Amino acid sequence: MGEHETTGIFESLVEKMPGNFDIYFWNFVVLMIFTLFEVGAVFFDKIPGTDIHITLTWVWAILIGVGIVKGYGIAAYFMHLKGDPRIYTRTALFPVLFVLLMLWGIGLSNPGAVTELPSWCTPNWDYAVQR
Amino acid sequence: MSGGEAHVENSIWMRAVLMGGIFVAIGLLAFATMGVGVANMKHHDYEEAIHEYEDAKYAYENAKANNASEAEIASLKAAKDDAHHHEVEAHLSYLTWRTAGITILLMCMTYASFIGLGGFLNSIFPDDHGHDNHGYGGDDHEHHGSGSPIVFSLGIMLFLMGFPSFQETLGHMLSGVDADLGGLGLSMLGLLIVTAGVANWWREDLPFIGNHEQIATSDPFEGQHIRKAGLWVFIMSEVMVFATFFSSYLRMRTEWCTQWQVNAGNENCTAVDTLTASDFLRPNGGMLDGLGGQGDFMTLLPGAINTFALIISSYTIVLALKTAKTKDWQAPEGMLGKLMPTKKAAVRNYLIATFLLGSMFIVLKLVEWSHLVAEGFTIGASGTTGQAASIFYIATGAHGLHVFIGLLVMLYLIFKADTVGFDEKNGQGIEYFGLYWHFVDLAWVVIFPAFYLY
């Protein structure tokens, strides 16, 4: 939401689009379409008009993929992190360190953490196995 | 006032009082039509559906007791199930209208008391015809901050101190039981101080037309607007708050055997032991002890509409900012031009559109909650379903609270857009609020798939 000009793949695509719509409009359109996609992935068992079954793995992948695209669209264009000075992006990303720590904690306290997680992301669980 | 600010008579705040009156009227009208008129009709339908279900149930049990033919029993069972389904539908339909009516009334009353009381306090404030003392400085000095946030924080502290007994005391008062007013009184005093602090903050900001925005002079934000940097630091802390909810949810979810886990073939999950909100909302959700598994298009619809509403509202606030920042703005042609004949009206109307979408979000959210509670998804539910309900209501409730606080702030922005106005110099007020609003949208981008679809 700043006043800086930005350049990138999405921006150059927008320039080629018909009509006199700006990048915010096209970002809005992308967000709406991806939301439809997200809801549709959960709502339908099969891809409409086909016999292709939408598996749980696909739903997972779609939810995460769509979430990343939507999150990027909102942060980069609506919040104008793309174009604003980098310090704002760094400020926004700073808590991600703590989020990663929390995710690590979730993994370590998971019921299967002792036996199922790779050793490189766990402390020495030997004492737990020996008990 | 000096040349660095707009000249604002305090009497202009009476327009805020008028806004408050309009909200009271809208709230009462919505409650009378939706919460009482339509809801009473729906309640009548619901009562009829209960009778039909009881009759069908009696006929079925009677047929079984009298050893009727299998075909007759099967037919009566189908009729009983049908009547039960109809009863549930009628109940949810009643809840929809009743909850919507009550929610709109409560929201409008809160809007009215906030903007109305704030406006009233400022309208009776003596006009300052001398030198500037509003903090937003004249031509020779820059904005040097405000003490209002400290007053505001004190009010929040008192409100929270009294909050634990707030609901209990209110319940006692409504049911005619002797109530200890201590906690409730402290909370109400806190709310009054919050309103006074916010009203003073508004009074300081209203004349601000963008001159002398304070700039950071040292690393890491050197050269940046201090208010914008502060807003980003605030958003950083908000990310942590939502990350806490989200990580709690993920941690608990790793131990639940949900329908999703069973379908995914998790070898530790042979049967469903936990229902999540999505089991009630999405199609093919899990069932446990007769609960859940009834999700279809209509149950998923409120959450989906809310997702679209937040995205559209994010775009309308961008349009409000873009309009404010455009120097040679021209009214659009056609119908839109009639709605937005001037730049000032356009900014205000885009803000109003954002406000309406946000309000709709809250109404649909509470309607959805009322349905989930009626279907048994409560924090008192047996087993780990109660845990799932707890984290669902906490996370979506905290998000809803953020939306509602945003709406209260937007009331002031609409008022300013309608009086002093926003332009390319002071439009950053909308920009900074927009950052918060987009963050709320961003949080929903994570909450919606995690709690509603997964």
Image (spheres, rainbow, N blue to C red):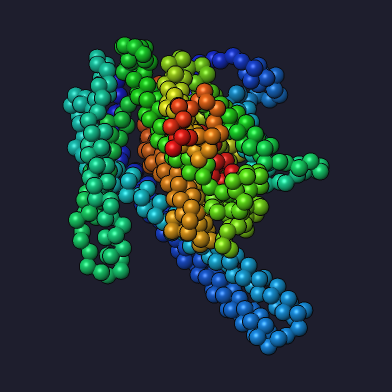
* Nearer-the-camera pick, B127 or B203: B203
Q: Is residue B138 visible?
A: yes
Kindly identify the residue that appears in the image at 73 percent across and 85 percent down: B68
Compared with B16, A67 (above or below) is above
Quarter in which the C terminus of chain B is drawn: top right
Residue situated furthest right in the rendering: A50
* Nearer-the-camera pick, A104 or B78: A104
Residue situated furthest bottom in the rendering: B66
Q: Is residue B316 visible?
A: no
Quarter in which the N terminus of chain B is drawn: top left
Please indicate whether residue B100 sits to the left or right of residue B238 in the image.
Answer: right
Kindly identify the residue that appears in the image at 53 percent across and 61 percent down: B375
Q: How many labels sit on residues? A: 0
- Residue A37: image quadrant is top right
Kindly identify the residue that appears in the image at 24 percent across and 28 percent down: B146
Please indicate whether residue B128 sits to the left or right of residue B252 in the image.
Answer: left
Q: Position of residue B159 (x, y in %)?
A: 26, 47
Kindly identify the residue that appears in the image at 46 percent across and 51 percent down: B387
Q: Position of residue A20 (x, y in %)?
A: 65, 24
Q: Position of residue B368 (x, y in %)?
A: 52, 54
Compared with B10, A83 (above or below) is above
- Residue B173: image quadrant is bottom left
* Nearer-the-camera pick, B428 or A94: A94
* Nearer-the-camera pick, B52 or B37: B52
Q: Position of residue B430 (x, y in %)?
A: 43, 29
Compared with B138, A99 (above or below) is below
